[in-house]
Image: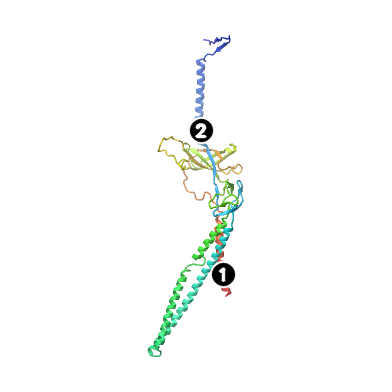
């Protein structure tokens, strides 16, 4: 039956056509096409997931992180020099901030003088031991002489050759010699107790004075703050003339060659994720034109909510399940970092290749070396030890040898 069209005549004489609904056959065709599209989409997604999707997990909740090495004073002082500002490249050991060293210099000079004085006093203790040993030997000889004299006079008195008064004088001399020997023995023991089993450098008084000198030396050296590592200066807050206290943050040094990615994956994405799996990273800074590569270094041991200041109390009140995220640390390969550096806090897109599932989920062994360290401060105490040794030598054995040479 042919399709019929009807017309309606309006009051003004115009004719308005009225369309009829399409035939049932045309509607059925459209539904079949729509169904075919949906089936093809489902099949395409299934093929994509089977061949590709199940082996990759990605997230855009990922950010660049790194070490922020804080520069803080260890002594109180007034800032006189600032040698670097935000964005400046500094080398390890380079001077960053200088405090007024006047007070620390005076304190060190006083500690040096005190150590020299203590060393000379201890030298006197060793000399006293020698003197008391000589005195003890002298008193011992005098006692033997007095005893021999008394024995001889006692024999003479028995024969009546000398008077009892003379024998009494000899007995008094013997008693006096015995008391003198006992006093010398006591003085020798007392003096020896102050220096037994020690040398000048190991004497307790010298070690205490040396410790005070070391502290004074370190305080003077620490009035000059240097860069612990090579990196770029950030967050400078100190100004010339500021009176700073120990622990006050003055600036930070960021080594941009030692950065990593903290990617926050949903807990449903972690079932096949393992340490050591390869990762591809795109930074929003470069618009995806640069592809960084890395490896999964560690999987977090707790979600962000578990370590928050106020953890969620799911056991009370109404509860709504929320998919949690776990931080995954990714170690970057330094391939493109020199030409395309990243900064702390930048956003990235991370894709983890899950093909290799042989790696561990948690670190199987403890680290055998420090993750991050500096040796810029190691020489400070060695220099203080050299200063202490020089002062002890100049005021101890060297001064003693010079005195013996003059005699």
- Please tell me how many numbered marks the rendered image carries: 2
Which residue is labeled 2 in the image?
51
Which image quadrant for residue 100?
Answer: bottom right
Q: Position of residue 277 (x, y in %)?
A: 51, 41
Q: Determine the residue positioned at 50% across, 21% down.
A: 32
Tell me if residue 288 comes above or below residue 16 in the rendering: below
Marking on residue 399: 1
Crowding near the residue tagged with mark 1, few <14, some 14–19, many ≥20 C-alpha atoms within 10 Å: some
Circle 1 — which element?
helix
Decide which of 81, 358 is in the foreground and name it: 81
Which image quadrant for residue 333?
Answer: top right
**Marks 1 and 2, how far apart in space?**
86 Å
- In the shown orientation, is residue 190 left or right of residue 382? left
Circle 2 — which element?
helix
Q: Position of residue 92 (x, y in %)?
A: 59, 51
Q: Position of residue 376 (x, y in %)?
A: 56, 54
- In the shown orientation, is residue 178 left or right of residue 247? left
């Amino acid at each position: 039956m042919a399709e019929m069209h009807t017309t309606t005549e309006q009051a003004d004489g115009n004719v308005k056509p009225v369309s009829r609904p399409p035939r049932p056959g045309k509607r059925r065709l459209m539904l079949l096409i729509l169904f075919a599209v949906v089936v093809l989409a489902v099949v395409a997604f299934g093929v994509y997931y089977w061949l590709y999707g199940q082996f990759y997990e990605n997230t855009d909740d990922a950010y660049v992180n790194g070490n922020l090495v804080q520069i803080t004073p260890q002594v109180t002082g007034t800032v006189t020099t600032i040698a670097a500002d935000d964005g400046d490249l500094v080398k390890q050991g380079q001077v960053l901030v200088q405090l007024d060293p006047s007070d620390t210099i005076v304190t060190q000079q006083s500690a040096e003088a005190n150590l020299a004085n203590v060393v000379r006093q201890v030298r006197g203790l060793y000399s006293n031991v020698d003197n008391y040993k000589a005195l003890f030997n002298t008193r011992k000889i005098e006692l033997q002489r007095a005893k021999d004299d008394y024995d001889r006079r006692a024999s003479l008195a028995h024969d009546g050759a000398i008077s009892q008064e003379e024998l009494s004088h000899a007995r008094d001399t013997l008693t006096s010699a015995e008391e003198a020997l006992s006093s010398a023995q006591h003085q020798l023991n007392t003096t020896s107790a102050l220096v037994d089993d020690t040398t000048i450098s190991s004497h307790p008084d010298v070690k205490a004075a040396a410790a005070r000198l070391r502290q004074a030396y370190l305080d003077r050296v620490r009035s000059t703050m240097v860069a612990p590592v090579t990196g770029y200066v950030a967050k400078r807050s100190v100004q010339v003339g500021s009176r700073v206290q120990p622990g006050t943050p003055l600036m930070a040094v960021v080594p941009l060659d030692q950065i990593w990615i903290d990617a926050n994956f949903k807990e449903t994405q972690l079932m096949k994720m393992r340490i050591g799996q390869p990762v591809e990273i795109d930074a929003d800074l470069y618009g995806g034109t640069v592809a960084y590569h890395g490896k999964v270094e560690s999987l977090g041991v707790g979600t962000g909510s578990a370590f928050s200041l106020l953890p969620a109390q799911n056991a009370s009140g109404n509860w709504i399940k929320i998919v949690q995220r776990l931080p995954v640390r990714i170690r970057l390969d330094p391939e493109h970092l020199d030409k395309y550096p990243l900064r702390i806090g930048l956003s990235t897109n991370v894709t983890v290749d899950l093909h290799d599932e042989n790696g561990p989920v948690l670190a199987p062994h403890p680290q055998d070396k420090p993750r991050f360290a500096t040796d810029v401060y190691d020489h400070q105490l060695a220099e203080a030890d050299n200063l202490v040794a020089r002062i002890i030598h100049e005021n101890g054995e060297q001064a003693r040898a010079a005195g013996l040479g003059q005699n």
